[in-house]
Amino acid sequence: MTSAPAIGFEYRVSRWAARLSIVVAVLAVLAVASCALPLWLKFLSIAIVLIATWRSLSGTSRSSVAAVGLSHDNAWTVRLADHEDMPATLASFRVMAGVVLLRLRLARGGVQIVVLAPDNSDADIRRRLRMRLATLQLDASAQRV
């Protein structure tokens, strides 16, 4: 059997995630405004929702990841915005409705979360990555038996 080819891609933050956060925040504000809480508690709850949304959006817009690579031997590499290449390990992943979420643990500590959605990545890259992640999951479950 031939070995799997390396997968590499440049990364930019998904705009879909930011838009989804804003929609969820608007729905949360509407829910709080329409409930039967005292007025001061409504204002406090709305302020907490807005602050949490702002922190979430400001944190995701400053991603330090510029590119990610997966070699043929399943070694992960993360290129940071300052052009430093750093080895990483895959801590966890999720695949939901065509979106791939990777949680990569960097060698020097820290975790980077990479969200690959249709607006920030190629469909072929996501497909190849889903296939490789599925084989990694099968290999891991076979080793546990």
Image (spheres, helix red, strand yellow):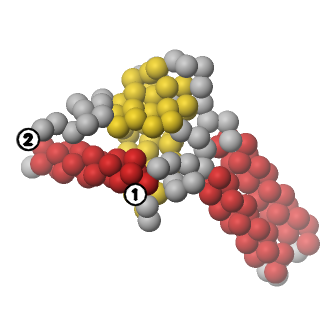
What number is the disc on residue 95? 1
Q: Secondary structure at mark 2?
A: loop
Where is residue 67? Give x, y as percent.
50, 32
Where is residue 70? Give x, y as percent.
34, 34
Picture residue at 68% right of the left edge, 41% below the top: 61
Closest to the observer, 35 or 98:
98
Where is residue 43? Give x, y as percent.
88, 65
* Residue 94 in view here: no
Q: Amino acid at mark 2?
A: Met
Q: Quadrant of residue 22?
A: bottom right
Q: Secondary structure at mark 1?
A: strand
Closest to the observer, 33 or 130:
130
Is the Cβ of the residue at disc 1 closer than 8 Å to that at disc 2? no
What number is the disc on residue 1? 2
Q: Is residue 21 left or right of residue 95?
A: right
What number is the disc on residue 142? none
Pick whichever of labels 1 and 2 is earlier in the sequence. 2
Closest to the observer, 63 or 105:
63
Q: Residues within 10 Å of mark 2 (few under 14, many from 20)?
A: few
